[in-house]
Amino acid sequence: MADYSSSHANSLVDRTKKDLDWIMLTVLEHPEYFWEGRNLTEDAKSFIADPDDVWQIALIDEMQHGEQEKVGDCFISIMLGHYSRFQLDVWLKKETELLTARLGREPTFDELYEDARKNENFERFRLCYVLHLPQKVAFQFEAYNMYRTFGDTFLACAEILHPYNYPYFEKIWCNSLLSCMGDQVLRSERKRAGEPGSSFRPVSP
């Protein structure tokens, strides 16, 4: 463990993606690395509308793609349609502006899709949604039970880096319990009314 810690500061200049245990150590020892977005390219920084959100993109971009996927799978949006609207109104609009500036013309849908895929923006946006709008997010328990270590470590890092130490874990757990309770009420009401099933269908960010 001593060797692991002593080499840690020097490793911050290495642009290789890190695993979440390594990222947590960085958050604890060098939070300014994320607050200042030292691992971000200028293109990545231009995507950030609010400077106070730099740490969010820096945290996500430091993660390995496989861990981004596992963490993203741990969460769902509890507002039907909101994730899709937010994606179109905010993320896709900004993506279009940046690619238009780069190409000198408006990009085609295929060009937008390929640019997002190449830059891993799909996973980035899922995790940005969790950090930016935790009040609209719950745990997707089937995936969360499999990837709990990844999801918990990600939220722990976020709580440390947030300027006011926002209680992400507590808020998302509360949302999850309320969603489950609401679903059970709907099931009971529909059963009494002779209707099949429940209308609650959370959507994956």
Image (cartoon, grey):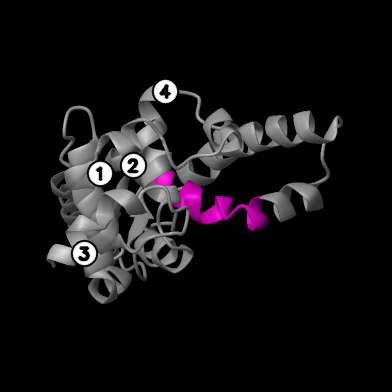
Residue 187 visible in rendering: yes
In the rendered image, the vertical position of residue 9 relative to residue 75, given as above or below: above
In the rendered image, which quarter contains the N terminus? bottom left
Say what secondary structure mark 1 lies in.
Answer: helix
Tag 3 residue: 4
Q: Which segment did they paint magenta? A: 116-129
Q: Is residue 121 magenta?
A: yes
Amino acid at the residue labelled 2: Leu
Query: What main secondary structure does the magenta stretch of the protein show?
Result: helix
Look at the numbered disc 4 and give the secondary structure of its residue. helix
Residue 151: name its quadrant.
Answer: bottom left
19 relative to 84 in the view: left or right: left
**Real-space Cα separation, disc 3 to disc 2, in angstroms:** 29 Å
**Nearest the eye: 108 or 183:** 108
**Marks 3 and 1: which is nearer the front?**
3
Q: Which residue is mark 2?
A: 131
- Confirm or deny contact between disc 2 and disc 4 (CB under 8 A): no
Determine the residue positioned at 79% across, 49% down.
Answer: 111
Residue 51 circle label: 4
N-terminal of the pair, mark 4 or mark 1, is 4
The residues bearing labels 2 and 4 have C-alpha atoms spaced at a distance of 14 Å
Q: How would you rate the neighbour count of disc 2 (Cα within 10 Å): few for under 14, some for 14-19, many for 20 or more? A: many
Q: Percent position (x, y) of residue 167?
A: 15, 40
Marks 1 and 2: in contact by CB < 8 Å? yes
Residue 203, x across and y down, in percent: 43, 57
Q: Tell me which amino acid carries mark 4.
A: Pro
Mark 1 highlights which residue? 158
Mark 4 or 3, nearer chain start: 3
Tell me the CA gap for discs 4 and 3.
32 Å
Label 3: state its secondary structure.
Answer: helix
Q: CA distance from mark 3 to mark 1?
A: 22 Å
